[in-house]
Amino acid sequence: MKSSLPGKFTCLILSFCFTGAFAQTMTPELLWQLGRVSAVGMGTDNKTLVYKVSTPDMEANAFTSAMFALDMASGTVRPYGKEEKLIAEEGISPDGKWKITTRDVKLMSVSGTDHYPELDKSNAMVFNSLQHRHWDQWEDGAYSHIFIEAVDGSTKAVDIMQGEPYDSPIKPFGGSEDYTWSADGSKVIYTAKKLQGTAYMVSTNTDLYSYDVASGKTENLTKANAGYDKNPAFSPKGTLAWLSMATDGNEADKNDLKIMHNGKALNLTASWDGTVDEFIWSADGSTIYFTAPTKGTAQLFSISIPKKDNTPGPVTQVTEGQWDVTGLVKHTGKEVIAGRTDMNHAKELYAIALKSGKMRQLTHVNDALYNTIKLSKVEAKWVPTTDGKEMLTWVIYPPDFNPTKKYPTLLYTQGGPQSALSQFYSFRWNFQVMAAQGYIVVAPNRRGMPGHGVEWNAQISKDWGGQNMRDYLSAIDALTKEPFVDKDRLGCVGASYGGFSAFYLAGIHEGRFKTFIAHDGIFNLKSMYGTTEELFFANWDMGGPYWDKNNKAAQRTYTEFSPSERVGEWDTPILIIQGGKDYRVPDGQAFEAFTAAQVRGIKSRLLYFPEENHWILKPQNGLLWQREFFKWLDETL
């Protein structure tokens, strides 16, 4: 089997993993002591990096945070006070005249007291359309709107969305990336999905709107495109760039990088066989730097802007190595500031030399802790698939791995289903912690994941129980041929679509696995369609509604691919984990699966978090999750 990376990079990583004397291995408790690093921005002097460190506080069941300023030349770090003016105030127009603020505007009656004020103790909600809840929030009739006002206070705040019943920033996750000032300060460009009700929930058609400050008029800049248009950003020279997907309803379509060029939208990455995660402009506006998944990693790329014709420069890969480049901050001339992670290290901030791709570590928040622990060997293997292709599979080994011993092994099933399985560092699905407890982790880049071409990425839609399930089995079967894998002690674990995968594999694994763990997984595809909220996802990936008997793709999904249809073949212990505020994969999925396992007499456990959503976010719940995860594996594997 071959490595996915040039030899010099593989040797560099592996030699780092095994040098030095360490006293301990990573534990859930140590994981929840790590500082979580995020960039705030570059100072106006372009020489100082401001960043924030959030640290779990177990006793308070919350996070504390502090901000720091790093002198890029000397490496000196000092506390950064909010009263300092080193960072430009967010939302100020380039000419300094106007300021953006955002706030909710109540536009619709939803609650019982909205309709019947005299019934002031009522807590009912009344809905007339499907836009009733989203991710972990119920619709309350208030919409997020952008306001502008004069910095000097000479004008009242103006709602640039003019009282329309639409969100910008887009709830529930939208922020300042959803709006920007034009380079001359005359316009605000913002992202919105101007649909309502059922139409909103079956569509991904967001557009970029341009609001003219002088006239108060709004123009749709991307009306011709049917899918996502988002993340507008202007170059210093005034060129607008944004991210765009072509297909309405497909949230995992190829994400292209577009600019407004000669008055028209120009797709810079149309001929490139990849998908863009995020981007920033160069300081002179001649180049765009972006990150994208590639071969189980996420790297930095660049593309030059066409000057007169419509021909962009080629896409050039800047970095290469066994890591993820994530969280672009700024181009400073010869470097780009960004975050970096790998499966052994949480995010720190780096300066990336653009000519060589070399990285200079800037923050060292977690170095002291990592210097006390033994790290895991992380290896890229290429596994043949049942349809004659090669699949990259990450294998994470326990610290002090001894190839003469046999180890229990976990097949990790990724969510999404189109999320990249790269060198990310999760504070829940943490491969470093799993390996440190004595498990080998097998993490395949199965069908559906970006970073291996658009066709590989797109194949999984409407084929949930097909080729990608065979990919999973190919990966674990290949590893069980290794003498150090205990094939009598195999487990399968995953969340979201990975939870679906665990449920589905439980019915087709033919005795391979001794235990399963499914977190927020889909169990019954029919009830999933009837209770999830973003129906565009179910329509695109599952094929459509279950009652459409003329839709062959949908009927195949509901009859062949629903784990509930294969529960009669379940015979293996299973831990089922669920968040009560997960409206993407509602808790009924977990309850149905747990009921089925219990009635069938299968050893099973339900771990339920009433106040958590699709993720586990509170510190004490996060630590409890880890303890229950390994407790279950101790009992069953």
Image: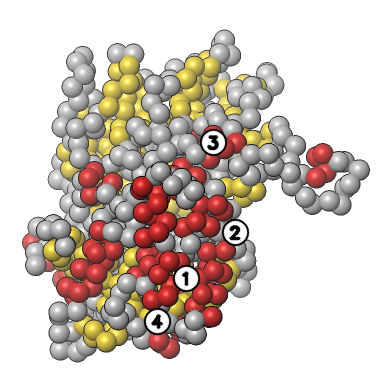
Q: Amino acid at mark 1?
A: Trp
Under circle 4, the secondary element is loop
**Spatial distance from mark 3 to mark 2, Cα to Cα?**
21 Å
Quarter holding residue 194: top right
Residue picked out by circle 3 = 200
Eye-nearest disc, 1 or 4 = 4
**On the rendered structure, is 385 left or right of 146?**
left
**Spatial distance from mark 1 to mark 4, Cα to Cα?**
35 Å
State which quarter of the image contains the C terminus.
Answer: bottom left
Eye-nearest disc, 4 or 3 = 4
**Spatial distance from mark 4 to mark 3, Cα to Cα?**
41 Å
Which of marks 2 and 3 precedes in the sequence? 3
Image marks 3 and 2: residues in contact by CB distance under 8 Å: no
Residue picked out by circle 4 = 571
Q: Residue at x 28, y 23 (%)?
A: 266
Eye-nearest disc, 4 or 2 = 4
User: Where is 111 relative to 11, above or below?
Assistant: above
Q: Nearer the viewer, residue 410 or 168?
A: 410
Which of marks 2 and 1 precedes in the sequence? 1
Eye-nearest disc, 1 or 2 = 2
Return the residue found at the far right. 118
In percent of width and height, residue 515 lies at 38, 80
Which of marks 4 and 1 precedes in the sequence? 1
Residue 581 tag number: 2
